[in-house]
Structure formats: structure tokens, C-alpha cells
Image (tube, rainbow, N blue to C red):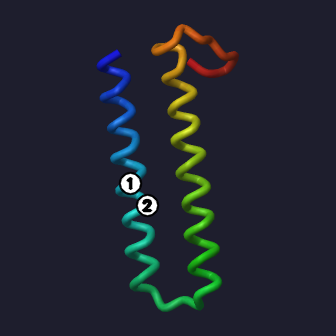
Amino acid sequence: MIGVLIQLIIYLVIVGVIYWAVTTILGVIPLPDPIKRVIQVLCLVVLVLIIVFALLQLLPEVGGIHLRGFG
């Protein structure tokens, strides 16, 4: 259980650093506002999907729930 929590924290830190890097780079590059917003939304959607996929992989270890194709 402790290993799962540590793994989840590592996933969240990595996703947070990626999101921070993308938003920082977008602040430096001169792009029109709609394009920046589209890139930010796409980045956020991809990162949320990564977090959901990571949670689905950790689910069998925590609750004993087994999903086909995960874990």
C-alpha cells in the first residue's frame, strides 16, 4: 500500500513538472491567445488521461479489483 502511494506521488510530480514546463514555454513563445489556450487545454486533457491511466494501473494493487487490460 505504501509503495502504491509513493508511485502515485511520483506520477503526480512528473505530470506537474510537465504541465509547468509547457505553460512556462507557452508564456515565452509569442503566439496568439486562442492558439495558446488550445495548446493548454490539449496538454491538460493529455495529462489528465495519463493520471487516469496510472490510477487504473494501481487499482488492482489497492482494492483487489481486476480490470481486463490493466495490471
Q: Name which quarter of the figure residue 8 lies in.
A: top left
Question: How many neighbours does mark 1 have within 10 angstroms: few (below 14), some (14-19), or many (20 or more)?
Answer: few
Where is 59 relative to 33, above or below? Answer: above
| Res. 23 image quadrant | bottom left
Total marks shown come to 2
Q: Is residue 68 above or below residue 44?
A: above
Q: Which residue is mark 1?
A: 16
Q: Residue at x 49, y 23 (%)?
A: 58
Amino acid under label 2?
A: Tyr
Residue 42 versus residue 12 in the image, above or below: below
The residue drawn where x is 34% and y is 26% is 5
Instruction: Please provide percent x and percent y for residue 13.
Output: 34, 47
Question: Which x, y percent locates residue 47?
Answer: 53, 51
Question: Mark 2 packing: few (<14 Cα in 10 Å), some, or many (20+)?
Answer: some
Quote the CA–CA distance across marks 2 and 1: 5 Å
**Quadrant showing the C terminus:** top right
- In the displayed image of the protein, which residue is found farthest to the top? 64
Residue that appears at 59% across and 53% down? 46
Task: Check if mark 2's residue and mark 1's residue have beta carbons within 8 Å.
Answer: yes
Secondary structure under badge 2? helix
Give the image location of residue 31, x and y in percent.
54, 89
Residue 17 is left or right of residue 37, and the answer is: left
Q: Could you say whether the residue bearing mark 1 is in a helix, strand or loop?
A: helix
Residue 19 has which mark? 2
At label 1, which amino acid type do we have?
Gly
Q: What label sits on residue 66 in the rendered view?
A: none
The N terminus, quarter of image? top left
Q: Position of residue 69 (x, y in %)?
A: 67, 20
